[in-house]
Amino acid sequence: MKKSHPEALPLDDTLSPLSLKRVGIDTYRENVAYLHRECDLYRAEGFQALSKVEIRANGRRILASLNVVDDTSIVDCQQLGLSEDAYASLGTEEGHPVSVSQAEPPASIPALHRKLAGERLSRDDFRGIIRDIAELRYSKIELTAFVVACDRGELDREEVFYLSDAMVRVGRRLDWHEQPVVDKHCIGGIPGNRTSMLVVPIVAAHGLLCPKTSSRAITSPSGTADTMEVLADVDLPFDALGEIVRTHRGCLAWGGTSQLSPADDVLISVERPLSIDSPGQMVASILSKKVAAGSTHLLLDIPVGPHAKVRSMPEARQLRKLFEFVAGRMGLTLDVVITDGSQPVGRGIGPVLEARDVMQVLSNHSAAPMDLRQKALRLAGRMLEFDPDVRGGDGFGIARDILDSGRALEKMQAIIAAQGAKPFDPDAPPLAAHHFEVVAHEAGVVTGIDNLKLARIARLAGAPKAAGAGVDLLARIGDRVEAGQPLYRVHAAFRNELAFAHQSSERDSGFSIGQAAQITRLNVEF
Amino acid sequence: MKKSHPEALPLDDTLSPLSLKRVGIDTYRENVAYLHRECDLYRAEGFQALSKVEIRANGRRILASLNVVDDTSIVDCQQLGLSEDAYASLGTEEGHPVSVSQAEPPASIPALHRKLAGERLSRDDFRGIIRDIAELRYSKIELTAFVVACDRGELDREEVFYLSDAMVRVGRRLDWHEQPVVDKHCIGGIPGNRTSMLVVPIVAAHGLLCPKTSSRAITSPSGTADTMEVLADVDLPFDALGEIVRTHRGCLAWGGTSQLSPADDVLISVERPLSIDSPGQMVASILSKKVAAGSTHLLLDIPVGPHAKVRSMPEARQLRKLFEFVAGRMGLTLDVVITDGSQPVGRGIGPVLEARDVMQVLSNHSAAPMDLRQKALRLAGRMLEFDPDVRGGDGFGIARDILDSGRALEKMQAIIAAQGAKPFDPDAPPLAAHHFEVVAHEAGVVTGIDNLKLARIARLAGAPKAAGAGVDLLARIGDRVEAGQPLYRVHAAFRNELAFAHQSSERDSGFSIGQAAQITRLNVEF
């Protein structure tokens, strides 16, 4: 039976209005409104606990779910309480009169039902759904239903374009008034791998405009934003960052991404706990953010490996074609590189450890991890070739010159200073207090490193919440090790987190030791 | 990338224990725990707002999602607060020391991911998932993902049996130590249609054991429990109802159904807002409850009509076969009747109005709605034939004798008295104060009545929350009406609800008026 949706009930004008109260409860993204059980309005409209209500004041309105209160010290019968985020987003001071009514159901629910029934949706359907999602009109249940219904190839490539396009339209869109505007992105899944913090200063030093949008870690031990935050402030106001980009040709960890493609953050809040990462949603999420940020050219890194998001070359090529189709429809120039994702890139896994690696590479430090340097130079080289004046094939050499000459370091320092520098010495990084080492139980050659396992251990150790926590790799695939030789060191800020990471590494270190012949190398593009 | 699930962190024993506080906030089914932001435990374990925590006290434990508090008048740094339902289900008094840790992820999540990936699940997979769901270990997001993944024929009939069987196993199961134990069920969607309140007294008067499980309205204007509650108490303790059944051979509106197939109520909390009602889930929901209640024989009513849940005979036959297959695997004797669902059954829609119809039929009142009487007699007749001593074909006559002789009324009064009678006079039912009539705009014949539309108007008018609210039908399909003649009367307890039902009926009355020839009658089994 089709459900009969409740509609907004007109407020009964015989009822006295309620006055707004800020309730000191942090419910994070979930707006909660507190209404006393004895309140006339509650009794008249007969709301139920958890029913969705619309709150209006000063011509502004928010949606919230209702908690019914029996304790007048929280709210009394003349008050409407709001949780902290809800209070902030309504943006009205305490004591102000507020009106409350049952929330209208989102207008796009019929389209959601059609998708649930397996239908192909139109461009307008996707616009309606994404608008409602961006305005936080969907409940967690409705959001999840949409995400699951779009999962597993339920979207054809035309629908993926409609979805991406709709996500751009509901948000703020930047225009840098020049061409090209370049960016890079990795689909993720490889611990360490902080190439952006090397690529951005290199291409910016060359003069290309690179307003890098970066996010914090979602399921990983550190995102570019988390690592950059060790060196500089990343939560800068939207316009301040715009100014930095115009002055220095680049920035790191764009703070305003929530205004770019706002629906993306809402969808991620559901995709993450389900670890749903379908190709269609990945493409829409990445491309919508880049287009909204005003990028005209994008270099996409797809790592392939036994423990990477993409596990085979055919799978990688299929994903690449979907990215190419949608980017084409959105007028974005796309260059895809498929890279070796068989092990972490760089030594450190966790904000401080990764910042150390990055600064060592930028300063041409003798201890700098070469794999990170090489990968960053290759990606930067490909990006430099977005510059019409750079000859095909010359990019890598130019990138290396910029790095070796110290101009990349100089540019990075300028960006750090502009974003608000924090003191950091790569030779004495502020690592978390507690640590332990994981050693090889037998002699042999490292034949494999499980990315997921090491990322997991780093997270259990407290990364990224504890910036100094994480995993420091002491051996890599192909290295010969003796029994008892340390493979990696784990740092943690709290005893219980240390103990927890330790238990996990005891169960499985994530390292395979055997004979060199057992190493399987993927034949990737470079 | 597979998500790295957080695991339960051992409580850091250097931390002082928290003391339990009851917080006067009703969050309904959603357990919420309140922890102060400055609390050592919060800082040490670094919980996030909304993260799922496990709370232990007195050897009992509950799961809750965390709200972070900044106001010591709600909880201070030495307290852990619980919302009212959470406090009740932990069942420990205030001030008692409690321990809090990050909740373990449900063990069945990998099976959920396999279902999301489109795999067929095993019997053990379903048992694991349903156990976690019954223990409230699934988040709304995980629940919705399971429901959506099982929707749209994603379950084969064997899986539907596994699901139904698992749902029975996690709950309490009754054994009446006799045979047959009969029950009836309608898949719903038809307003009014309160046949159970007639069928149960008839078959119980005949001597068959009929422990009727009934629910409250989910999306309808009234469920059997809501209507029965007008006449008697329905929220009786489990064992008291068992005693009533043994004494009187029947009861109405079994109060303990939440202990029977507990996972069902949890799944419904997600299926309802999405109006997902896939055949597999419907079959599992209905059959698991009946088997758990100890029924050995079930009569199932599948109404078919243009505005019913099932809209064509082929669809009805397909659903019937699925019910028959699963019932067979569960050892339940099933008899399916396909009935006319083209319009409401009886006159009243809403608890009081339906109670009036039922009592008029039982007392052979001259104004009793004949359609309700006829349908009830036919269903009761089919049920009586579950009695090995009743000849095939004799059921209807026996049922009619029981009703006409007043023995059905007598039995109903005994059941009402046993459940705790409330005063009720069918000639003066306690209807809601406000009302208006909807009239025919033109002369003609009623050619159609939209079940959904009338159910909707009754709900907007306040049913079932306001027992006296609802719709009273004054005309039926086939009736000739004059312009201005009333088609139905709407009753509401509150002005705003009256206004809202009025707007809705103005947009569309739900009645079609035309020529007799336009009436389309479904050729159903009786």
Image (cartoon, coloured by chain):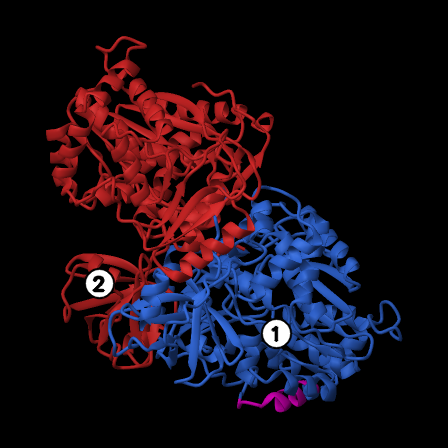
Chain colours: A blue, B red
Q: Measure how far apart labels 2 and 1 are at the Cα level.
A: 39 Å
Q: Is residue A390 above or below residue B152?
A: below
Of residues A83 and A232, the one nearer the viewer is A83
Q: Residue at (75%, 73%) from the top-left corner?
A: A182
Q: Quadrant of residue B182?
A: top left
Question: Label 2 is placed on what type of residue?
Answer: Tyr
Q: Are marks 2 and 1 in contact (CB under 8 Å)?
A: no
Horizontal side of residue A4 vs A379, given as left or right: left
Res B256 visible: yes
Mark 2 falls on what kind of element? helix
What number is the disc on residue B87? 2
Q: Is residue A88 magenta?
A: no
Q: Residue at (48%, 58%) from the top-left corner?
A: A7
Task: Write the start and end of the magenta stretch as one range.
Answer: A411-423
What residue would you read off at disc 1?
A: A259
Of residues B310 and B398, the one nearer the viewer is B398
